[in-house]
Amino acid sequence: MRLLIVEDERRLATALARGLRAEGFAVDLAHDGVTGLHQAGERDYDLIVLDIMLPGLNGYRVCDRLRAAGDDTPILMLTAKDGEYDEAEGLDTGADDYLTKPFSYVVLLARIRALLRRRTRAGTRLLRVGDLTVDPAARRVDRAGTEITLTAREFAVLEHLALHAGQVVSKGDVLDHVWDFAYDGDPHVVEVHVSALRRKIDVPFGRRSIVTVRGAGYRLGPDGHRDA
């Protein structure tokens, strides 16, 4: 899942991004309201963490313009201000939740997960591909009734493939949705994670769910038993 953090306190933004990336999220950063609004309009995000006191365009206005444009991406507002009127204004402009600084990272992460679960339940359901089940809300994977333990990044790759089950997904598309927009590391990282997924969700069950389409990418399907 991809998150956008719009926060002008760069050290805080960097710290939040580092923690969320460790949880398996792809995270993009913006440090002013104008840039944040532009990025939110240019890319699809699963959630936006939006500071209120931003240069250029404050968080209230960013939120208001996104909602006016029909963007229903969940928004968690952050602010150093404290008071019921500030909270009410944030919620009135269309924010989904509100967190006052200073806050605990653990609480922030719990709020983010709660908002994502709420959106998942309202939209994306359990993702089933044959006897493989991916639960985005619970971040759980089962095959034939057996729970499979994945790393955060492995889960993110599998979730993206499951969302496009039956379709060919390019390595670039996986990188774009699972890793950060500014990622400039080895693109073979996708192959590494796909290989790890095969060892966990396919090999122990005699399956061949993730197929490499030469020159194009990968396809996740309900392919039965592996070829002998």
Image (cartoon, helix red, strand yellow):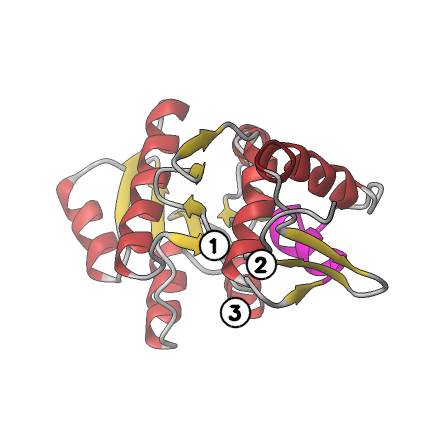
Magenta segment, which residues? Answer: 170-182
Between 227 and 7, the residue placed more toward the observer is: 227
Q: Is residue 128 left or right of residue 179?
A: left
* Amino acid at pointer 1: Gly
Q: CA distance from mark 2 to mark 3?
A: 32 Å
* Amino acid at pointer 3: Gly
Furthest residue toward front: 228
Task: Tell whether label 3 touches label 2 (CB within 8 Å).
Answer: no
Residue 27 visible in the current orientation = no
Residue position for label 3:
41
10 Å neighbourhood of mark 1: few (<14), some, or many (≥20)? some
Secondary structure mostly seen in the magenta stretch: helix
Q: Residue at x 46, y 60 (%)?
A: 57
Is residue 12 highlighted in magenta?
no
Residue position for label 1:
130
The secondary element bearing badge 2 is classed as loop
